[in-house]
Image (cartoon, rainbow, N blue to C red):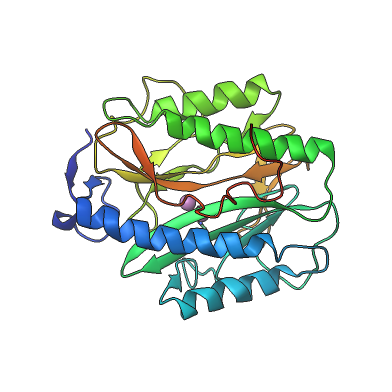
Amino acid sequence: MVTYLEADAAPLRNTGQIRLYDEAGFEGMRKACNLTARCLDELASMVEPGLTTNAIDRFVFEFGMDHGAVPATLNYRGYTKSTCTSINHVVCHGIPDDKPLREGDIVNIDVTYIVDGWHGDSSRMYPVGTIKRAAERLLEVTHDCLMLGIEAVKPGARTGAIGAAIQAYAEGERCSVVRDFCGHGVGLLFHDAPNILHYGSVNEGVEMRPGMIFTIEPMINLGKPHVKVLSDGWTAVTRDRSLSAQYEHTVGVTETGCEIFTLSLAGLDRPGLPPKI
Ligand code: MF3
Ligand code: CO
Ligand code: CO
């Protein structure tokens, strides 16, 4: 049985109970998430051929320090970087290194800042120079998946409605949904209950209630959904080496739907893609 409780009444670890945050919590999340979005905005004009993912990592660390934020991934379960950078067939949790980005790459940059204890978790895809039409289509499909998932967030519906919307659209576009990673409750904790699956059906999952805060972060492949984790223990890649993409927002459930905390105020939610009409 799932239980829901006021966020500040719960111990500060993932107990499987679902925290319901109040207006002060939403305000804390707006601040943390907006800083994450501003960092991702800044990166839009920096990403180009020749830039290393370590340079991206350094920027994420320093932008955080300059604004009173700590990257949540630093020393998280043995991870030692400030961001994840996942290129081409890397699905997620790519580790920044000294290899330069190349013309035609697509790279996901995933940032989580902690501001006053609140975690703002978001990621976007960045085209490096000019990319192939198939890659651009994957980015568009994946961003549409994220936004369709967000549209399914309403009190009274189950979290399965999010996955159902994403899976139906992705598979209709002849893409596949990665099953091995999911969205998650977030707020005072980085990874909390409930899990948010990006596939499934409307009658699965837990009922959404006002005050819940979680991420939606679909990973969509051009080929098969299967992934493997490399020997570094982090880097997840598609088994068939097909291209993979991911966008992530942090959202809070309201009385009528949801609030997207990590929206770009600069209109850069889909950097490098033509504006949606
Ligand atoms: N930010 C990722 C997420 O969306 C988690 C990264 S954990 C790390 O949940 F350790 F790989 F950095
Ligand atoms: Co996340
Ligand atoms: Co993330």
Q: Residue at x 70, y 68 (%)?
A: 53
Q: Work out whether residue 96 or residue 104 is closer to the camera in this orientation and state it.
A: 104
User: Looking at the picture, does residue 140 appear above or below residue 31?
Assistant: above
User: Looking at the picture, does residue 237 appear above or below residue 50?
Assistant: above
Picture mark count: 0
Which quadrant of the view contains residue 50? bottom right
Q: Is residue 175 visible?
A: yes
Q: Residue at x 36, y 19 (%)?
A: 203
Residue lying furthest left: 9
Image location (x, y in percent) of residue 150: 45, 35
Image location (x, y in percent) of residue 122: 50, 53
Which quadrant of the view contains residue 120? bottom left
Answer left or right for 103 relative to 47: right
Q: Work out whether residue 229 or residue 92 is closer to the camera in this orientation and state it.
A: 92
Which quadrant of the view contains residue 205? top left
Q: Is residue 188 visible?
A: no
Q: On the rendered image, what quadrant is the C terminus found in? A: top right
Q: Residue at x 46, y 67 (%)?
A: 76
Q: Residue at x 71, y 71 (%)?
A: 97
Answer left or right for 228 relative to 30: right
Image location (x, y in percent) of residue 42: 61, 65
Q: On the rendered image, what quadrant is the N terminus found in? A: top left
Answer left or right for 115 relative to 99: left
Image location (x, y in percent) of residue 39: 54, 65
